[in-house]
Every structure is written in structure tokens, then in C-alpha cells.
Amino acid sequence: MRHLLFSAFFLFCLTGYSQERGEPAAVPTGQETAPAVERTRTLTFAQMGQPNGVRLSGINRFVDLNSGIRLDELVTRASLSLRVLYPQGMRHDQSFVRVYVNNQLSGLSQLSVARAGVPHTVEIELDPLLFSDFATIRVEYDGTYDSECVDPGNPTLRFDIRPESTLTIGSTPLNLVNDLALLPAPFFDPRDNRKLRLPLVLPVEQTEASMKAAGILASWMGAQAFYRQAEFELLETASPTRHTIILTKGKKMPEGMSEADIEGPSLMIVSAKENPWIKHLYVMGRSDEELLQAVYGLVIEGQVLSGQKALVKKVDLGAPRKPYDAPRYVPTNRPVRFAELIDFPGQLEVSSDKPRASVNLRLPPDLFSWAGRNIPMDLKYRYTAPSRWNDSLLNIEINNSLIQSFRLAPRSEQVQNKINIDLLGQAELTSEEALQIPAFRVGGNNELAFAFGFMAEGGGSCTRVSQVARGSIDPESTLDFSNLPHYTRMPNLTAFANGGYPFSIMADLSDTAIVLPANPTALEIRSYLNVMGLFGQWTGLPATRTTLIVSDKPEGIGTKNWLAMGTSDRLDWLNTANMNLPMVLNATERSMGLPPAIQWLKGLWQSDTELQPSDSARALIQTAGSLGAIVGFESHLAPKKAGLVVTGTDQDSFERAVAALSDYGDVAKIKGSVSLIRGDDIQSYSLGETYISGALPWWLRLRIAFSEYPALIAVGGALAGVILAILAFGWLSGRASRRTKGN
């Protein structure tokens, strides 16, 4: 009896916990299942955004770490293992490390005198009940030394946390209700900051349409995963131990169902037979068209789905997208408010403990800047005003480069009166500045940061950081990129590897064709899905209007940008005379054109006709090594359209080339028009012909020409002077002639 009461009480508590978190409660099932096994996850500080570790001090006293708790997990234990180093000289009986979980004190450790100056580990147990959807773990250092006046900047108060420090979380799975309203969870859970690795089951009979449906689904998941990135694995059947999405036309159905049970394009979520906390999402259709419609319903209307099963009767893809309107891009056709750039409330608020606020700016990589052209910023900010002039200031940075610095003005009677009228709690000063950000400092991915430095007078001879000072950047502040035209020289693999350019100009990929070889291998399909996931990550939208061509002789590319993928022996259609590839490779031979600089040197003794693309010098090398390549060039089918090939001499090198696009370290090495990948080594070159994407107004082209060639100014000025002199001479001669005739 006591055992039954305890079980009922435990179930009640578990249900209440789920409901308190705003989640579906765990539901009992009548089937026999395997017992839930505790999962253990260990995250290093490097994995939680601190790759170089953390240095705390009397000024910067804490660091915040974020760790999401999945919807289908219940935390049972948690601990923090800090690998630390601090100097001798502190009052260790008054120096502590405190750990807060979601602003609740969860652990405390007093610093040891014996371990000062020696790297060691501090173990702190955390309360698992404090962990909710998003757990913010604050490690706070409170140190002091034996002095009448403690200077927060004294090096004695330095406290280093190594990047190998870890957070360990133990959890048990929860059995979520089978409800489509939870999507994209549990297949993708925004609370989980790890890379998304999602198993997919594709139809038995794979067609161009079914692979397009899978690609759209992959791009949707990539958009959801964003910075986490998405990676896909192909399975023959649904996994009993991992959440899986199954695309089927009736051959692969849940137990107890058959092809006849498919009523049309539909979605259904079920539990795995062996483990009810494992979910399988079936995307079903009786034909390719219905399967594609079911995927459209999932990625476009997913927010209105509910229940265990849904029939997708009609889908409207909406109006065609406009260039550069991807949600990940900052608008470049109008001034943009900071309120449009923030991810959460309070992002632009700062205090003495958190003196830095920042926003991320992802811009189209073809924004053209030149000397003298800046980006206007209308900045409004407020802060706790110091009582008199001191070293309090505001630093503005772009990509860790200082743009401008302002000293924070002290209070005045006028400001105090204004504060009283506005009913603010402290004496705060509001300021507005019109700034110009140098355009050459802004790239594709940027961080705009605002760092407040507060200083206030302390007692006696002490000057220390004010503990009550606050500041904020007004969300109505604006940035304006509209005066920068879209213009860049292509091919540009840097722009592709960092943001999918030029394919991402149209966020739904309506101007893009993906080309795969006929009868693609499992590796080629998986690589295609991973690249589609990257497109979703880059744009923030599913690629609902992309064109997929599966053929050894592709037709229908037309005037689109196109991307071909596969091993080199399966892309023979690229080896044609009119393709003008900067590089051609296969399993035994590689051919590369001369870099433009070398061609220019040869031009000193060769005529222009000898340097035409059809007659450009090439080197033919016979070798049998493994080599991956990413090659960009102008499409042979339409001017100013991109052609791009991701390939390799064998399966391993092709897989490595695709993987390089998902590795942030590798992406930094992908440049120019050709990137060659040999194991961990990536070499990039600028080969072949270039072309222009975008356009400049005539007056700007003239201005740039004059700035690049100052002699043109002298020649133009001389010509203008001659013309004016001739006109003036003619006018004066005519006037003199008329005067003579009049007399």
C-alpha cells in the first residue's frame, strides 16, 4: 500500500512539473516498454561559447553560460566542474565562487589557500529542480584581499577558468503526447544548443519530386537549427532509439497501417513501439505530388498543426520573394531599427556587472563600399549619469574594432528636471548621436557592440566601478545601409561559403537549380540534404521554390544560378568546351588555368587574342591522389549567373568537400574561385575569368574611376578647360562680331 501511494505521489509530481513548464505531461501507455535510461550530457566551456576560457576579476565578476533543457527531458542531476587558477594574496576566508541557475543560488565554494597559484578543479553540485527550458548558469567570483581600499582592477583579484571546465547534466526521457502542435520538437528542439543530427527515411522509389520534397524539409530544419547547423542521416527504417522523420508513399508505414490508409497528403506523429518517448513523424502521400504537398504543409503551415494526424488539403506558397529579403539579412532598402535586430528583451541593457551589449548584423556580401562612403547610424542611449566628469565612457565597436568613443556627461539641473518629469528611478541622462560607421569595416557577418564603462567616486581615496550604474541603447536607434549598392566581382567562394551567395539572393531559392547525377548514391543524396540545410541556415526560410534536376545531361537550368554536386566521374557533362571551368579534375588527371596575375605577366609579350579564355594556358597533371574541390565560375547558359561545383575524385574527398562548408574553421579558408581540399588542408586560388554581379550608378562608376586613376582627373580637367575655352572664345568672338556690325 505504501509503495502504491509513493508511486501515485511521484506520478502526480512529475505531471505537475511538466505542466508547470508549459509542456505536455508525460502520458502512460498500455504497451510494454523498456525502462527509461538516464542520459548524461557533458558540455565544456568551449562548447558553451567560451573557447578561450574566462577571466574574472573585481571588475568583471561573472560569466553567464546557457544550456537548454530539451522538451522531452527531465533533469535529475547537474554539476559544474571548474578548472581554475587564482593568485595568492587574497583573503581566502572571504573569497567565494557562487553559481546561480536561473537567478537562484544553487552552489557555493570557498577558495582554498593551499591551492592558490596552482591549477586545480572545483566541483560544485547544482540543484536539478532549478533547470527549466532555458537554463542560464551564472558563475560569479567574489574575491577580496587584505586592504583598506579594495581596487577592483587589482591583479590580485584575477580568477581564471580554463576552457576544459565542464557542465554535466543527467536526465531521464519524458513521454510526450503525440501532438503535431509540438513541431518542430522533438525532432528539433530550440532548447538544445547542440548540432542537429536528424535521421530521415526516404521513399523506397526515389524520384526527382520525392528528393525535392526531402530537400525542402532539410532546408526547413536547417532554418530552425540556424547557428547549431543541421546534419542528416539516411536510414532504411525508422530508428527505435532516435526521433526520425519518414517520407513515404505507402511502402513504409507505422505498425497496423497500410498504403490504403493514406487519404491524401498527410502528416502523422506516432511513438516507437519499443520506446514511447521516441517519436516518428510520417510525411505521407499517395504520389510524388501529394508527398510534396505534405512537405509544403509541414514547412509553411506547421504553426497551425495540432492533433496526432493532419490532412493537408491545400497549400499556398505565397507571393514570390523579393531579392535580399531573407529573414537572416538586415534590410538594406531602408533604415532599420535596433528593435528589429534584437533576439530577446533586455539585449540592449547594460549594468556595471554586464557592461557590454551587442547585436548581430548579417548583411548581403555584395554590398559595395568605397573610400569615403560610411553607414549612417542614429544612436540614442541613456545611462546613469555620474555626479561629475570622470572616465565613464561609451565605446562603440564593429567586429571588435573601435569605431568611436564618447565620454558620458555628468548630471545637470536640466537633466534632473527632465528625469523627474519622466518618473525614472535614478538620475539618468538621455543622449543622441549621429554616427558614421566606415563601410570597409563591415562584412557579411558582423557584431555591433556597445560597451559602457562606469566610474564613480568611492569613500576616501578609492575610485571604483559604480554598482548601481546602468545604461541602455534605445531600440529606436537606426542603421541605414540603403546608400550601398549591390555590386561585387564574381566568382567569390567566400560569399558562398559564408552565406550561400548568390543563390541566397532569393530566399526561397526560386532562382536556383540544384543538379545531381542520375541515380544518385546515398552519399550524394545525403550531401544534397546537408547543403539544403545550409541554405535554410543562411536564409532562415525553407527553399520552397528551388529547382532540382537529377540527370547526367541536365536540361531546364535556363537563366538560373546552378549548383552541381557529385564525384567527378559522375559529372562528365561539365567537361565541355563551352563550360570554361577554371579547373577540371577526375580520378587521374587535373587541369588548372593560370591565375589572372600570371596571365597579365604573359600579356607583356603576348597579344590580347592569345589570352582569350578559349586559348588560356592550362596545366595538365596526371596523378592518382584523393582531392576534393569547390569551383565557381560564370554559368555557360546565362551571363552574370553563377555556376558552382562541389566535387571530389572519390567518395571520401567529395564527402570532405561538402563537410568543409559546415565547418567554421574550413569556411574561413574557402576563397577565390577554386578551393582544393586534401584532408585537413584547404588551398584557395583565383583562377579563370571573372564577371560582375549587380550594378553601379553611372556617376558612382565615374567617381570610382577618377579615384583609382588620378591621371584621369588631370586629363579630364584639361579637356574640360579646353572645351570651355573654345566655347568661351566662340561666344566672345560672336559677340565682338555683332558689336562690330552694329557700329
Image (spheres, rainbow, N blue to C red):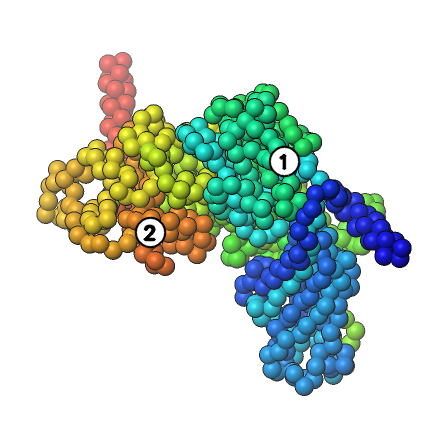
720 in relation to 193, above or below: above
Q: Earlier in the sequence, mark 2 or mark 1?
A: 1
* Residue at the image point whose x is 37% and y is 52% from the top: 656
As helix, strand or loop, the secondary structure at mark 2 comes to helix
Q: Is residue 519 left or right of residue 405?
A: left
Residue 437 image position (x, y, % from top left): 52, 48
* Residue at the image point whose x is 64% and y is 27% from the top: 310
**Farthest residue, direction right:** 1
Residue 187 image position (x, y, % from top left): 60, 43
Q: Which of the two marks, 2 or 1, is nearer to us in this view?
A: 1
Whether residue 478 appears in this view of the structure is no
Residue 308 image position (x, y, % from top left): 67, 32
Figure quadrant of the C terminus: top left
114 in relation to 350, above or below: below
Q: Residues within 10 Å of mark 1 (few under 14, many from 20)?
A: many
Would you name the residue on which mark 1 appears?
269
Would you name the residue on which mark 2 appears?
653
Q: Is residue 296 left or right of residue 598?
A: right
Q: Residues within 10 Å of mark 2 (few under 14, many from 20)?
A: many
Figure quadrant of the N terminus: bottom right
Report the amino acid beneath label 2.
Ser
Examine the image and state in which quarter residue 269 appears.
top right
Residue 402: mark in rendering: none
Gap between marks 2 and 1 measured at Cα? 37 Å
As helix, strand or loop, the secondary structure at mark 1 comes to strand
Report the amino acid beneath label 1.
Ile
Examine the image and state in which quarter residue 282 appears.
top right
**Farthest residue, direction bottom:** 114
* Residue at the image point whose x is 38% and y is 49% from the top: 655
Residue 387 image position (x, y, % from top left): 76, 61
* Residue at the image point whose x is 63% and y is 60% from the top: 40
Whether residue 117 appears in this view of the structure is yes
